[in-house]
Image (cartoon, rainbow, N blue to C red):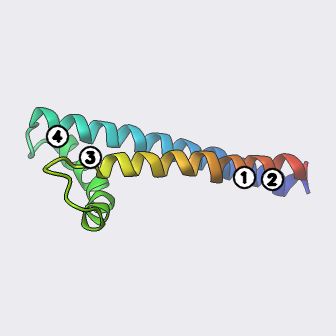
Amino acid sequence: MFVVANLLLGIAKVLDMLLWFYMWVLIARVVISWVNADPYNPIVRAILSVTEPLLYRIRRTLPIGGGIDFSPLVVFAGIYFLQIFLVRSLVDLALRLQ
């Protein structure tokens, strides 16, 4: 049973790292939108291509906020929820299986 516990613990840790990484990419996206960076820069294009699909879906469902984009806040809340609920649940389940 310890093999399944270690597998769940590994999945939880990798998921937690991916969520943190996506949060930092999203922070970079917000900063890029404030400073009007060069859209032809490969780093800027990569950040935009990683974040835009999720932000676009959220923007479609949110009501118009008077010109303020609240979609990154919704994604931050979603990432925080996944870290609290999913990652901690996987870690707790792994610890109980050991």
* Number of residues whose C-alpha sits closer than 10 Å to that of mark 1, classed few (under 14), some (14–19) or many (20 or more): many
Label ID, residue 93: 2
- The residue wearing badge 3 is 47
C-alpha distance separating marks 2 and 1: 5 Å
* Number of residues whose C-alpha sits closer than 10 Å to that of mark 3, classed few (under 14), some (14–19) or many (20 or more): some
Counting from the top left corner in percent of width and height, residue 64 is at 19, 59
- The residue wearing badge 4 is 33
Q: Quadrant of residue 76?
A: top left
C-alpha distance separating marks 4 and 3: 11 Å
- The residue wearing badge 1 is 90
Check disc 4 and give the amino acid type.
Ser
Is label 2 in contact with label 1 (beta carbons under 8 Å)? yes
Is label 4 in contact with label 3 (beta carbons under 8 Å)? no
Q: Residue at the location (32% across, 47% down)?
A: 72
C-alpha distance separating marks 1 and 4: 35 Å
Q: Quadrant of residue 49?
A: bottom left
Counting from the top left corner in percent of width and height, residue 16 is at 58, 44
Q: Secondary structure at mark 2?
A: helix
6 left or right of 20? right
**Sequence-first tag of 3 and 2:** 3
Check disc 3 and give the amino acid type.
Ile
**Sequence-first tag of 4 and 2:** 4
Q: Residue at the location (52% across, 44% down)?
A: 80
Point out the image quarter for the N terminus: bottom right
C-alpha distance separating marks 3 and 1: 29 Å
Counting from the top left corner in percent of width and height, residue 70 is at 28, 49
